[in-house]
Amino acid sequence: MSHTIEIAKTIASQIGGRRLMALGAASRVALAPTPAQQGGLEFKASLFGRRQCLVNVALTHRDTYTVSVLKPRSRSVIARFDDIHCEELGAEIELAVETHFAN
């Protein structure tokens, strides 16, 4: 299995399967490495099937994560969190998505 897919699977397990289901995570995609990141995971989140957003989780070269919440069509950034550690990852994503859906 490629290193890119391994990183995406690790991120998904650190977020937690139950939390991903609660966020309505769908269309998971492994992100390719770039000069700014080692790889990552992107998925579509929806609560109650109404509104949607994209969640982009990138593994940086400092072994921390950058989490971005994006509008699905324009891909404009709604919220961005830098230097997230693995134990904080699930809670930060959940907070960011719930804040987006509350507005």
Image (cartoon, grey):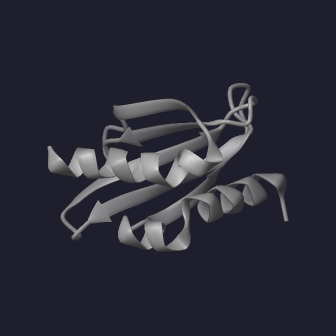
For image coordinates 21% across by 70% down, the residue present is: 48
- Classify residue 103 as left or right of residue 77: left
For image coordinates 45% across by 67% down, the residue present is: 19
- Classify residue 60 as left or right of residue 26: right
Q: Position of residue 69 (x, y in %)?
A: 39, 41
Q: Position of residue 47 (x, y in %)?
A: 26, 65
Q: In the picture shown, does residue 52 fall above or below 25?
A: above
Q: In the picture shown, does residue 2 fall above or below 59?
A: below
Judging depth in this view, the residue of 82 and 70 nearest the camera is 82
- Classify residue 19 as left or right of residue 10: left
Q: Residue furthest left?
A: 103
For image coordinates 46% across by 67% down, the residue present is: 20
- Classify residue 86 as left or right of residue 51: right
Judging depth in this view, the residue of 98 and 91 nearest the camera is 91
Question: Can you say which quadrant of the picture contains the C terminus?
Answer: top left
Q: In the picture shown, does residue 57 fall above or below 48?
A: above
Q: Residue furthest front?
A: 87
Circle count:
0
Judging depth in this view, the residue of 72 and 9 nearest the camera is 9
Q: Quadrant of residue 74?
A: top left
Q: Quadrant of residue 12?
A: bottom right
For image coordinates 70% across by 43% down, the residue present is: 39
Q: In the picture shown, does residue 43 fall above or below 39?
A: below
Question: Can you say which quadrant of the picture contains the N terminus?
Answer: bottom right
